[in-house]
Structures are given as C-alpha cells and as structure tokens.
Amino acid sequence: MNAIWDAIRWFFQSAQWSGPDGIPHRLLEHLEYSGLAFAITVVLALPLGLVLGHQRRGRLASALGFLVVGGANGARALPTLGLLTLAVTLTSSDLVPILLPLVVLAVPPVLVNTYTGVQQVEPGLRDAAEGMGMTGRQVLLKVEAPVALPLILLGLRTAAIQIVSTAAIAAFVGLGGLGRYIIDGLKRQEYATTAGGAILVILLAFAVQLCFSVLARTAVSPGLRRSASS
C-alpha cells in the first residue's frame, strides 16, 4: 500500500512535469515509437488481409488462408525481448531495434482479423454486388470491407494496445519513452518511479481502448455493431 501512495506522490512532484525526463517528454517519445510501429503495421497487414480475404475460391484461397492463420500464430510465439536483442545485434539504427519487435507483435491480430472479417462476409452480398456490375476491387472496398469493419477495428485495437503496452522495452536499448521510468527506477531502486511508469503505460493502454471504442461507435453502423456483438 505504501508503494501505491509513493507512486501517487511521485506524480505530484513538479520535477516530473518538465525537462527531458518529465512525463510530457517521455509520453511524446512513447507515442512516437508506438505511432510509427502502428503505422507500419497498418500499411503491411491491412491491405494484405483485405486482398487475401477477398480470394475465396479454389485451392489457392484455401492455401492462402492456412498460411495467413498459421504464419500469424507462429509470429505470436516469437519472444519480443529476443527480437529486440537480435535487432540490436544486426543493425546500428536507433529505431529499428524497437520497431521490429513491435511490428512483429502487432501484425498478426490485424492480418488475421482483416482476413477473417472479409472471409466471413456472406457470399450472397458479394454475388449481388457482382450482379450489379461491380468489379472485384469495388466489391472488396464497397461491400466486403465495410461489412468486415467491426472485426477489422478489433484487430487494429488489439494491435495498438499491444504496441503501447510493449513499447516500454525501448528503454532496454537506451531509447526513451515511459519505459525509461520503469528501467531507471529499478536500477536506482526508486520503486515509486517504477510504479509511476507502469501506471502511465496502463493509463495509455486504457486511453487507446477508449479511442477505438469511440471510433467503432462512429464508424460502424448500428446494425453491424449489433451483429458483431451477438
């Protein structure tokens, strides 16, 4: 209980809100790593999931589905800290060591949810769209993607939360972010600092969750929301 009160008092110290080691600066660093990793994840996984999910017929579609799900599940088993250590060993870049494990961690939920969401669109909707003269691209973007949006957003939300929660490992390679409080606090045995950093990471994860909840309510039609919840 004392540790909790010490962490609360830590937040109210003026030194924690200014300078290069202040909470605003560390939060911006954390958001920079997280935002860049999330953007790379979306660029890589979202289009791939849409295209692969659109392929439904034939053995090729079945093989692609197996590779998507199997490869994504295999990537989830990779150790984040191990990838970080490997990236530090193989590259001299500052950002690559932290971006690599974050992207590898975040791609599977986006890829699998996007693929599954498009695959689960009722064939009748697709057939009706094709009967109206829509091209394959139009069917994907105007019919399948909007119907799959609840599941797609769920994958994006999962990836974003995982990224902001794991970005604290940036401190292991000498970078900044909220993980700096956790690592430095442990080294100096300043447990209020460690607890404060952990609380900040948790609050940031809750903020991401809230943002995606609001996005789902504004971007997804009520009928699709009810269907997804049921």
Image (cartoon, rainbow, N blue to C red):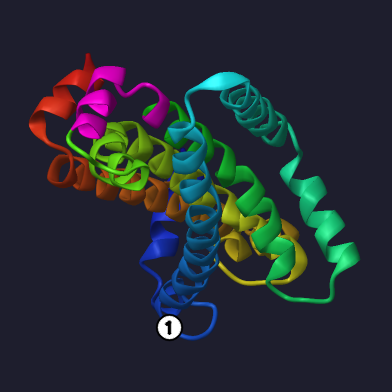
Asked if residue 100 is positioned above or below residue 125 in the image, the reply reads below
| Segment colored magenta | 118-131
In the image, 18: left or right of 153?
right
Q: Say whether residue 201 is magenta.
A: no
Q: Residue furthest right?
A: 89
Residue at (17% x, 35% y) in the render: 132
Asked if residue 182 is positioned above or below residue 117 in the image, the reply reads below
Asked if residue 31 is positioned above or below residue 119 in the image, the reply reads below
Res. 174 in view: yes
Q: Say whether residue 126 is magenta.
A: yes
* Front-most of residues 14 and 93: 93
Q: Position of residue 4 (x, y in %)?
A: 45, 45
Q: Position of residue 186 (x, y in %)?
A: 70, 55
Res. 183 in view: no
Q: Residue furthest bottom?
A: 19
Three-letter amino acid code of the residue under disc 1: Ser
In the picture, the quarter occupied by the C terminus is top left
Q: Which residue is mark 1?
A: 18
Query: Dot 1, how many residues are within 10 Å of its Cα: few (below 14), some (14-19), or many (20+)?
Result: few
Q: Main secondary structure of the magenta part?
A: helix
In the image, 88: left or right of 2?
right
Residue at (77% x, 76% y) in the render: 93
Can you tell which quarter of the image residue 21 is in?
bottom right
Q: Position of residue 168 (x, y in %)?
A: 60, 56
Residue at (67% x, 56% y) in the render: 169
